Image (tube, grey):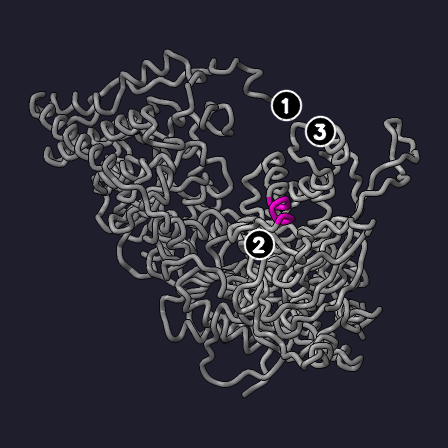
Amino acid sequence: MRLPLSDHGYGQHDIVLPPKAQDRHDGADIDLSKRLSVYRKLQEMRQFEKRAYDLFMRQLVKGTSHLSLGMEAIAAGFGAAMRPDDYTFATYRGHAHTLARGVPMTPVLAELLGRANGLMGGKGGSMHLTSVKHGMMGSYAIIGAHLTIANGAAWSAQYRRSGQVAVCFFGDGTTNIGAFHEALNYASVFGLPVVFVCENNLYMEYTAIADITAVPRPAADRATAYRLEPIVVDGNDADDVYLTALSVLERARRGEGPSLVEAVTYRHGGHSRADPGKYRPDAEVEAWKAYDPITVYRGRLRRLGVADADLDVIDKEVADAVELATEEAIAGELPSPASALTDVWSDGGSSWRN
Amino acid sequence: MNVALSVGPTRHRHSPLIRRLTREAGIDVDRVVGTGPGGRVNRADVVRAAASQDGGQAHRTQVDAARPDAQRPGTFAMSVVEVDMSRVVALRDHQSADIDVADQRLVVTACVVAAAVPTLRACPNLNASNDSAGRPVRREHQHIGIAVDTPDGHVMPVVKDAADLSLRGLSRRIADIVGRASRGELTSDDVAPSTFTVTDVAQLGVLVDVPLAVAGHVGSLAIGAVVERPMVVRRSDGERAVTIRPVSYLALTYDTGFADRTDAARFLALVKERLEAG
Amino acid sequence: MAQLTYRDAVARGIAQEMRRDDRVVLIGEDVAGAGGVFKTTVGLLDEFGPRRVIDTPIAEQAILGAAMGAAMTGLRPVAEIMFSDFFAVCWDLVVNEIAKTRYMTNGQVTLPLVVKTGNGGALRFGAQHSQSIENWAMAIPGVKVVTPSTPADVVGLMAAAIRDDDPVLFFEHKGLYAAKSEVPDGEIVDSLGTAKVRRTGRDATILALGLMVPRAIEAAEHLAARGIDAEVIDVRSLVPLDTATILGSLHKTGRLFTVEENPRLLGWGAEIASIAVDECFWDLDGPIQRITTPHVPLPAADSLEDLVLPSAELVATTVEKALQS
């Protein structure tokens, strides 16, 4: 019997390093204004997430929180490529994906604080952020389940001939669960307009993905099993993500069926707030922190002639927006007691009897 | 007044439905002839019994969820319990600081009242007396009427708010009102409405009797004479032995239209426990 | 009026709704080309075509996920889980996703979907293809649960389920698929949350569901011959539960019995018994008794299966004995 931890000690597996070059996509055909809006989105996600962390430390955010610090380029890149009526399905690590669809910060933060002015009135919490009117069709906490649900939204778009595409984000760990395989086969068989995006941050919760996956690239190496092209992108280069996103979304819209994209990235923090992250070798963590998506993008913008001062202005505007959202969230009232019993059913109630 | 004498707690074998129907009809479930399997009382039996009551009493209307609302003084029943009065007698004989009364007989009354008062809080159906329409109503405070035999007849001075008093306070108050009652010195304050009555029936050695002033109260307690008797006790080594103990019978007479034999049995069991545990 | 089998009534109910609303679509294993392994969807592919009647892979999670995603985005899907035992394979989709999402999103998401399934035993299919699991479903806040026992009810309750904007688990009884009875012509739309008195009586109330309904009615006939007039109620809907009809009957008779095909512990009757004791204690003229399959998986051998599933005779004997003690 092969046991990963008999090959190496815990936290002593082979490290994976980020790409060396940061300028591969400098010359991509992307509008500067588009790039600046992507940069702004990256900042919003980063600063929001840091504020969420701070509020958790101040015990204003309760329960747990799964932060996407370091992984913003994937949500931002796709967000910039998607149509407003496309559908997003994300995991419990979904704050960035929610902001990517244009959901304002205040209700998202207020939801983390459990307030009545939260995105779901405090009923869902951090792991279930949803804003149907923005196309953010939910953040899902059961590994793999939402891939099958994304298929349903894609089927509906296909049936209604609307041209909408469902984009489904999930982690590397998801590629080993049953629902992943059911969903991919199903999507491929029916040619559904769905894009599956695996955010491979190299770790399934507290375990190296390489130790418990039969193939080296957890998503890309499964693609051909489902009649799909293996696609790997640099998950920390928002332009690489954006260009790939445009391509796979277009494919789906043309009726050519689903895609599976593996975007390689890295978490700055632990799996969740509770995680001290002792299982990741220091050298690896350091290397990836240096390959921070925001650092990469700033560097590119600078090379393309954007002044640091202009980027600082964006940073400050975002900081102010985060500040305002914090105030508004903290000022939010507690949800009414009655709301605990509302909206089980479509009539707004929860009654199970007469 | 019909009295069914029973000693100690009895087991109910009547369904909730039958208990409700008999309570609503104001009839004693134990007096209904049952024609169901094994003599079980069924719905038809209750209807028959209700129809044949003296005066042809009609069924009462649907009762409230808490307690039935009896519309006339109901039938009374009595339950009796035997109490080992060793501790009470010890208090009496050793002039304990808890007691403040010269008349030894009043010590027993005071102890019984002291045991009854907290028990009435736990058995609120017995702390009930009739309102102006003759309907029993649960009362919030415990005002204990003490029956006194005077040259001019029976009087019932009342220890008001007995729950506020310690054993010492109770004994003093009882001694006071009984003394003044005997001398004809009671004031109107002393005869305020009572919620429960206690009568010492030990005169001339009577063991069990119906207490005075039963009407108007759901519960009335009679204290029988304290008599030394052989009793079986369990020694500390687990073996049984016969010993001599002072024993008294406490008889509770209660309005079955408002309380039932479970209430009575519980009340007596708790009072007995308090008196025996000290 | 016409005689219709229970299985044909399923197809009729779905077709009725697919004709009036083209957002209604059907997916499941072998539901299209084959008309369903139990022949409950015969004719639907022919009438509505492959866009609306779809054969899926064997992938219960994918099937229910697709139904949920489609329901969230404008369709009204009917999904089939072939044997209700298989719900265990996709229980996450039912319990954690379909049932909870409207609540967690504070009403943003509506899920007008129906999951139809072949439930229950008496067909010698063995333990993994015979269980009655509507009691599992009753325990989940956020899904409605119906179990019709007659062909007319199948049509009407299927229509009601499809028209309902909430997720409905529709438990067909495999043992009743061949049962035939009169069904009115034309459109039939019933109501969820309503029980039906199948036989009125004064001496005892017998509640039953699915296959146990005809058995309870048969038991009531035996009892009548012995002088006991039993009222039989087809509960039909576990969520919402028609407590008014059930408790009203108990108030009249004073005796309550349930006939449950699920294994003993936490069967659907346990909850009703609890409600009855809580709200009708002073109406009870005797203990509430649940007549259930024992707490075992179902055996395959016909003689054994017949022993463990409650029979009409067991119901009659139990009720008679209870009323005579």
Residue at 42%, 19% in the rendered image: A277
Lower sequence index among marks 2 and 3:
3
Same subunit: marks 2 and 3:
yes
**Magenta region: which residues?**
B177-183
Q: Secondary structure at mark 3?
A: loop
Q: State the separation of the CA atoms marked 2 and 1.
A: 86 Å
Relative image position of residue A323 (x, y in whole percent) = 18, 30
Screen quadrant of the N terminus of chain A: top right
Of circles 2 and 3, the one toward us is 3
**Relative height, residue C98 to residue B97 (above, below):** below
Q: Amino acid at mark 1?
A: Met
* Residue that label 3 marks: B95
Q: Nearer the viewer, residue A91 or B199?
A: B199
**Relative height, residue C11 to residue A17 (above, below):** below
* Residue that label 2 marks: B194
**Relative height, residue C41 to residue A293 (above, below):** below
Same subunit: marks 1 and 3:
no
